[in-house]
Every structure is written in C-alpha cells, then in structure tokens.
Image (cartoon, helix red, strand yellow):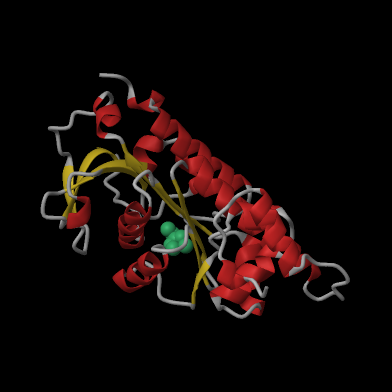
Amino acid sequence: MKDIMTAPFLRETCETASNMYRLGWDERNGGNISVLLDEAEAAEYLDMDRVLRRVQTGFDAKALAGRLFIVTGTGKYFRNIAKQPEKDLGVIRISADGSEAELLWGYSDGGSFTSELPAHLMTHISRLAADPLHRVVTHCHPTHTVAMTRVHPLDERSFTRSLWKTCTECVIVFPDGVGVLPWMVCGTNAIGEATAAKMKEYRLVVWASHGIYGTGRTLDEAFGLIETVEKAAQLYMLTAHLPILNTMTDEQLEAAAERFGVDYRRDFLDL
Ligand code: 2HA
Ligand code: ZN
C-alpha cells in the first residue's frame, strides 16, 4: 500500500486549502472542499474493506452510493490543513443506501466531515449530471465577492453582467455565468437543495452575505473560477462608486466570447 500522505489527491487538497487561506478567503474555519476520487487510484492508498467509523449523511445520497470523496472536516481551519491532513481531512465512501458516510481514513481526532456536506454532495449530483467528468466542489468566503452581494442586486443576470464587464477574461472563464442565492441559513439541507438546483446550470453559485461555491473537473478549475470571480468583484468594488467612463459593451462581450469559442449565456447580453 502506498503512503496516502504522498497521494496527489491529498497533496492537491492541502495546497488548495493553503492557497485559499493565503488569499484571505478562509478565515478561521471558513470554507470546505470535497473531491470525488477515482476508486482505483484511492485503492492504491487505502484499505477499502476497513471502515473506521460510520456517520449519518443526513439526507438521501443514494445517487452517490459507493462513491469516494476526500472532504475537509467540520470546524477545521484551512490555515492548518497542510500541517495536519490526517486530522483535518477525511476520505469517506457513501453507503449503499445513501444514508451513511463510511470513514476510510482521516478525522483522526474523532472529528467529522464539513457541516456543508449536504450542499457538497447535492452539488456533486447536479454537476455530474451536467458533466460526467466533474470532480470538485469548493466553498470559501472571498472578501470582494461577499462585499459585492451587500451592494449589488442579487439577480443572476445583472450580477453576472457586472462581473463580466469588469475585465475581458470573465466572459471567457465563466461564460455560463454565476448563480446567486439570497441569504439562507448555512449547513442545512435547504441551502444544499437550493445550491444544487442552481448547479444544474452554473459551475459557480454565490451565497449572499456568505461566500461562493466553485466546481470543476479539477481543483485548479474550481479554484480558478473562484479566483476570477473574486478578481472581478474586487474591480467592481474598487470602481462602483466612481463615475464609470469606460466599460465593455455587450457587443464587445459577445466578440470576446466568440473569439474564444465559449458557450456563453447569450440571454445575459442585450444584443
Ligand atoms: O465550514 O464556511 O459555510 C464553514 C463554512 C460554512
Ligand atoms: Zn461558509
């Protein structure tokens, strides 16, 4: 059996958590990450027959029965994850009936998975239906994105347009736009269901006065999506109170999207 501390999925999860912390997106225990693992790859590092503990998922996760995830732990600080992955991360397998998470490794101090597991698992179900190569769900609290939800209308079309118009790369990086939810109590099945409903058409969902969910086929993709939204939100917040003399027109957004051949939300443009 190979040493799990050397596993690429573990190293990359640690690196992502450290980078998110470094950028100020994950104060205290803010944020959580889950990555769907390839079973054959995970079996190189883990005894699949040895279940350490069983924890209720709290909802029907049957659609993910048998699937393996590496997941950040509840109450854990992103600042510490790379130093103590065996405490702050766990590898879980969803039980056959979808009611339990079987812990195969990690949470060595008796801890458990993130309180946002329902939102993560429901989002995995939505994104896998949209893209069979989907693997990653990340949540964090990027400062300017959260600030923007305090001053900007929360409808998806206008929120996406404001982000797109801040700089050229936005419409190219997230041509599918950004889903937006009003403020809701976090850690509940209700916010999980609302997030997963948006995730049928978006890879990014903003939670007003809270944070953002980013998804992707890789940690780099999910991270890069959030990084680009946060850059745009920063530009928005730096300039929203100033006279805007120059911006991108809808025709220019269309031209950028066409040049890079991305499938963009045409209905978000006034053409
Ligand atoms: O895990 O960010 O939304 C802590 C949170 C809850
Ligand atoms: Zn949060």
Relative to residue 159, is residue 242 drawn left or right?
right
- Tally the marks: 0
Relative to residue 194, is residue 154 drawn left or right?
right
Quarter of the view holding residue 152: bottom right
Residue nearer the viewer, 121 or 110: 121
**Which residue appears at 21% of the width and 64% of the height?**
59
* Residue 147 in sight in this render: no
Residue nearer the viewer, 268 or 147: 268
Relative to residue 112, is residue 219 drawn left or right?
right
Single out the residue that lies furthest toward the bottom. Answer: 153
Q: Residue 198 location in percent, x, y?
A: 42, 68
* Residue 8 in sight in this render: yes
Residue nearer the viewer, 40 or 90: 40
**Which residue appears at 20% of the width and 55% of the height?**
63
Residue nearer the viewer, 256 or 74: 256
Q: Is residue 140 above or below residue 86?
A: below
Q: Is residue 118 above or below residue 221?
A: below
Quarter of the view holding residue 145: bottom right
Single out the residue that lies furthest toward the top. Answer: 1
Placement of the N terminus among the 4 image quadrants = top left
**Which residue appears at 87% of the width and 76% of the height?**
243
Q: Residue 33 location in percent, x, y?
A: 42, 49
Relative to residue 213, is residue 130 drawn left or right?
left
Q: Residue 271 location in percent, x, y?
A: 68, 73
Q: Residue 136 location in percent, x, y?
A: 41, 47
